[in-house]
Image (spheres, rainbow, N blue to C red):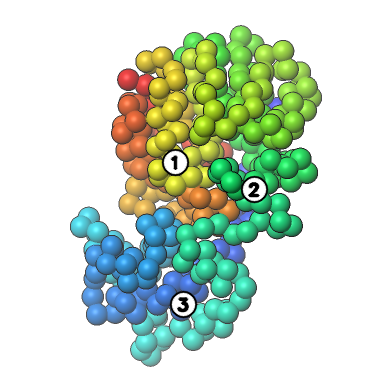
Amino acid sequence: MTPFDPPVFDPTPFFDLVRGNLATELLAVGVIHLDVPGRLALGAKPSEEIRHELGLSPRSWVVLATALKAMNILRQDANNMVSLTSEGSEFLVGGEFDMKGYIGLIAESPGVLGLLERLKINAPAANRANEGDAFIFREGKSSAMDSGDSARRLTLALSGRARICGSQVAKVLVTEGCKRILDVGGGSGLYAVALLLADADLRVTVWDRPEVLRLAEEFCLKFGVSNRLELIAGDMFNDPVPMGHDGVLLSNILHDWDLPECLTLLKRLHEAVPRGTPLWIHDVYLNDSLDGPLALALYSAALFSLTEGRAYSAKEYRAMLKGCGYQDQPHIVPTAVHCGILSARTV
């Protein structure tokens, strides 16, 4: 094996197991605490009506409803009318085979109650050890990514996925003659390293928080690409976008943010690069109908619990891109661990 080969086996099942507890928690929150099935026992209702009944934000409702649809409890038609599935009607709204009592056995567990609270307030969980919010950078807020020890721990935690996906990203990403790519929020720098090892003529800039870039510097030295990798510290929402790039990579970045922040970042990048510049979104993609797959519905709930974002569908990303002046490509190219690359270009 070369120093940056992909793993021999597929690690996706292990990633899914990490998020598996969220299936239990979402089920108990939706069925017991919020009684979504009971609200639909007499028939279908508009999605927005249910959301208002529950007092949930749009982001909270999408996370919960996507999971309940992926669990085959709810269905939603083209007119955004939400109803119970046959299975939901048989098992979750009373009757001879009702299971609500059984589900209720875990309804008061700390994980369930914690998720319920986060859905109600539309905010991530407090980070441990008073480090500050893990992945949120806002004026007046403490961020764990600005503290040396916690920034290193969190960046290393995320680097495992980057190390697994990086070589596949480099294999399938069509750089189209780009000479210098901007890796926005590039974290550990491992995606940049993979691109550089795959193309000896390429240069990459990783743009991220200063404490995060300390680890990126270690990795670029380890893999011998420091002469072609530039590290620029900054805040992607407030600092000037680094200039002189002919390609932009957003790998697992937009899912950390709610829609307004995603649009803000895409617009900032659009304004900073020449017309025709390619932009690549490397991420997971929910079904366009927001009804699964279940593994990604659970990942969306995990993102909701840690960040201000969630998982998005390709349809949602394409709407964002169109609204910000990009033209996207029709196909998503798979990479690894449920991820794929959606390509676009500034127009």
Tag 3 or tag 2, which sits nearer the N-term? 3
Q: Residue at x 49, y 86 (%)?
A: 101
The earlier-in-sequence mark between 2 and 1 is 2
Quadrant of the rendered image containing residue 277: top left
Amino acid type at circle 2 is Ser
Tell me how many marks there are: 3
User: Against 136, is 182 above or below?
Assistant: above
Q: Left or right: where does residue 268 sit relative to residue 216? A: left
| SS of the residue under disc 1 | helix
Cα distance, mark 2 to mark 1? 18 Å
Dot 1 crowding, Cα within 10 Å, few <14, some 14–19, many 20+: some
Where is the N terminus found, in terms of image quarters? Answer: top right
Q: Amino acid at mark 1?
A: Glu
Q: Nearer the viewer, mark 2 or mark 3?
A: 2
Give the spatial CA distance, label 2 vs label 3: 32 Å
- Residue ID at (74%, 46%): 150
Q: Nearer the viewer, residue 34 or 71?
A: 34
Horizontal and vertical percent position of residue 105: 56, 83
The three-letter code of the residue at mark 3 reads His
Q: Is residue 282 left or right of residue 14?
A: left
